Image: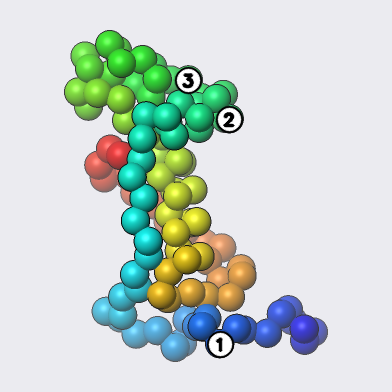
């Protein structure tokens, strides 16, 4: 470890090593109702569109949808398993727009 932090691992990149258009591949995950329920229980966010099938069916979503922050949590975990990785702390500034339900 140097004075700034741990050394970059061989499979990690710094931002100046990435060009516009570069792509990384991550594993896939299928979000299930059980995962959504577990996230609701963990966080205490039992908003009906996430946990009440009848309410969610009557909503503009047409069914149960995942919490946006569940999606971000999954994305963060998947990026640590992807083909394009960065040293810890390199992704401290996310900007997110929720475009479609999960």
Mark 1 near mark 3, Cβ–Cβ under 8 Å? no
Whole-number angstrom distance, CA of label 1 to CA of label 3: 42 Å
Q: Is residue 59 in view from this perspective? A: no
Mark 2 near mark 3, Cβ–Cβ under 8 Å? no
Whole-number angstrom distance, CA of label 1 to CA of label 2: 35 Å
In this rendering, is residue 25 above or below 45?
below
Mark 2 against mark 3, which lies toward the viewer?
A: 2
Name which of mark 1 and mark 2 comes first in the sequence.
1
Name which of mark 1 and mark 3 comes first in the sequence.
1
Q: Residues within 10 Å of mark 2 (few under 14, many from 20)?
A: few
> What residue sits right under mark 2 in the picture?
42
In this rendering, is residue 94 above or below 59?
below
Which image quarter: residue 66? top left
Disc 3 is placed on an element classified as loop
Q: Which mark is residue 46?
A: 3
Residue lying at the far top in this picture: please name it: 54
Residue 98 place in picture, x, y as percent:
32, 44
Whole-number angstrom distance, CA of label 2 to CA of label 3: 10 Å
Residue shown at 26% from the left, 45% from the top: 99
Q: Is 47 positioned to the left or the right of 30 in the image? A: right
Residue 83 place in picture, x, y as percent:
41, 75
Disc 1 is placed on an element classified as loop
Q: Is 49 positioned to the left or the right of 85 in the image? A: left
Q: Is residue 76 in view from this perspective? A: yes
> What residue sits right under mark 1 in the picture?
10
Q: Is 23 positioned to the left or the right of 68 in the image? A: left
Residue 24 place in picture, x, y as percent:
35, 73
Residue 22 place in picture, x, y as percent:
31, 80
Which quadrant is the N terminus positioned in? Answer: bottom right
Disc 2 is placed on an element classified as helix
Mark 1 against mark 3, which lies toward the viewer?
A: 1
């Amino acid at each position: 470890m140097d004075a700034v932090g741990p050394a970059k691992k061989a499979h990690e990149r710094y931002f100046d090593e990435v060009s516009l258009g570069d792509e990384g591949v991550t594993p896939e995950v299928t979000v299930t109702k059980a995962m959504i329920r577990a996230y609701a229980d963990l966080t205490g966010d039992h908003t009906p569109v996430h946990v009440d099938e009848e309410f969610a069916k009557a909503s503009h979503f047409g069914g149960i949808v995942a919490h946006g922050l569940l999606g971000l949590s999954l994305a963060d975990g998947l990026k640590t398993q992807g083909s394009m990785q960065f040293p810890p702390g390199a992704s401290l500034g996310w900007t997110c727009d929720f475009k479609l339900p999960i």
